């Protein structure tokens, strides 16, 4: 249960080249609904290199629980984790089930512990923090995830990056996804036990399948959650206008000081992604437009990341 389900990143996107993942920035308020896969998946899938995975016709199931990134200061027992700067809240039917505490830095994400509000006897603190991700990720690279709880139990997992591409699930199409093989230790021997598809754009889990019976979980990701984004919109005066547009839209934001900035356009179904700007900008108001991208009619996301703080706004082209 200690796995960090939803993590957000500050990254460029390329549809064909192997994705590069260099850092992360969890976005408070982002969330995903998680559905159990109760009928074995029948669709075969590639496990190496550049892939296009399509699971659209596979059956779905009722909602099992929801995971969301929350402000660490609002989580129970926050004082027990003074170095935590990211907390995930897992809920079922609106009732909190667990809080997962972690710490991220420029090159890694660490798990610190888990709190179960209704079952405190299961609370876990990791005396040796586990590395959930270490950056940059490289093809065929392995992340060792080893943690020891205060009760003395040791959990060992290895996550190997083996493929990349686009994936379609019953909940949508996601571009630039990487596939991990996850192994765990049993009697000291590492064995492959699941496959995990992760979005390069956000580091959200998209799909997880067990290797033994093809069961697992679908993740219905809220890519542009407005909860928790409002304070960033206000901080940077970020806006997209006109919206909807018949020609092109302007993406505008204000920097209080000089900052590292990236601006991207992401197609709703992953059919198009374009980097409008990436680099350092001086303080002041900046405006970019989508005119040179020549967007077809459809729905898009404007993603602006300022000093690793990501903002996403949806806009529509109607011509």
Image (tube, helix red, strand yellow):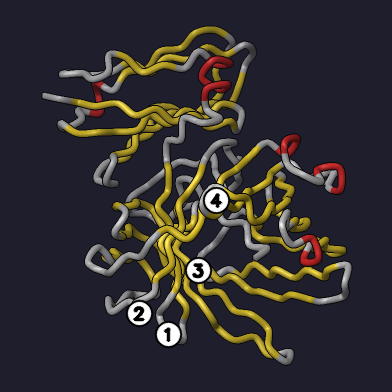
* Of residues 242 and 113, the one drawn nearer to the viewer in this rendering: 113
In the rendering, which numbered label is found on residue 213? 1
Residue 190 position (above or below residue 314) = below
x 25%, y 33%: residue: 299
Q: Residues within 10 Å of mark 2 (few under 14, many from 20)?
A: some
Mark 4 or 3, nearer chain start: 4
* Of residues 86 and 309, the one drawn nearer to the viewer in this rendering: 86
Q: Report whether residue 111 is seen.
A: no
Distance between mark 1 and mark 2 Cα atoms: 6 Å
Q: Is residue 166 left or right of residue 278?
A: left
What SS does tag 4 mark?
strand
Mark 1 or 2, nearer chain start: 2
Residue designated by label 4: 67
Query: Which of label 4 and label 3 is nearer to you?
Result: 4
In the rendering, which numbered label is found on residue 318? none
Residue designated by label 3: 180
Residue 202 position (above or below residue 63) = above
Give coordinates of residue 82: x percent, y percent: 85, 42
Query: Which residue is situated farthest in the left direction here?
Result: 319
Picture quarter containing residue 12?
Answer: top left
Residue designated by label 2: 40
Report if the CB atoms under discs 2 and 4 are less than 8 Å apart. no
Q: Is residue 181 left or right of residue 250?
A: right
What SS does tag 1 mark?
loop
Mark 1 or 3, nearer chain start: 3
Give coordinates of residue 272: x percent, y percent: 27, 41
x 73%, y 89%: residue: 188
Give coordinates of residue 105: x percent, y percent: 72, 45
Distance between mark 4 and mark 1 Cα atoms: 24 Å
């Amino acid at each position: 249960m200690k796995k960090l389900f939803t993590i957000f990143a500050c990254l460029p996107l390329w549809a064909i080249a192997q994705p590069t993942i260099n850092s992360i920035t969890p976005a408070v308020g982002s969330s995903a609904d998680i559905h159990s896969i109760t009928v074995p998946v029948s669709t075969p899938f590639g496990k190496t290199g550049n892939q296009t995975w399509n699971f659209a016709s596979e059956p779905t199931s009722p909602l099992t629980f929801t995971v969301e990134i929350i402000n660490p200061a609002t989580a129970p027992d926050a004082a027990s984790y003074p170095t935590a700067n990211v907390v995930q809240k897992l809920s079922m039917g609106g009732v909190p089930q667990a809080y997962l505490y972690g710490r991220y830095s420029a090159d890694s994400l660490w798990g610190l512990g888990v709190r179960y509000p209704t079952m405190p006897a299961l609370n876990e603190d990791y005396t040796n923090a586990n590395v959930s991700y270490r950056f940059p990720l490289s093809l065929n690279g392995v992340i060792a995830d080893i943690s020891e709880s205060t009760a003395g139990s040791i959990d060992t997992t290895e996550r190997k990056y083996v493929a990349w591409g686009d994936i379609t699930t019953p909940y949508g199409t996601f571009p630039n996804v990487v596939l991990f093989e996850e192994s765990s230790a049993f009697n000291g021997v590492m064995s492959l036990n699941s496959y995990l598809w992760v979005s390069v754009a956000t580091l959200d889990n998209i799909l997880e399948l067990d290797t033994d019976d093809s069961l697992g979980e679908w993740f219905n990701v809220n890519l542009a959650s407005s909860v928790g984004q409002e304070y960033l919109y206000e901080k940077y005066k970020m806006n997209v206008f006109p919206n909807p547009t018949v020609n092109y839209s302007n993406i505008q934001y204000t920097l209080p000081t000089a900052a590292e900035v990236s601006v991207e356009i992401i197609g709703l179904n992953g059919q198009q992604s374009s980097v409008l700007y990436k680099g350092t900008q001086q303080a002041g108001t900046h405006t970019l437009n989508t005119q040179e991208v020549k967007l077809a009619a459809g729905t898009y996301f404007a993603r602006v990341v300022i000093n690793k703080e990501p903002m996403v706004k949806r806009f529509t082209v109607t011509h």
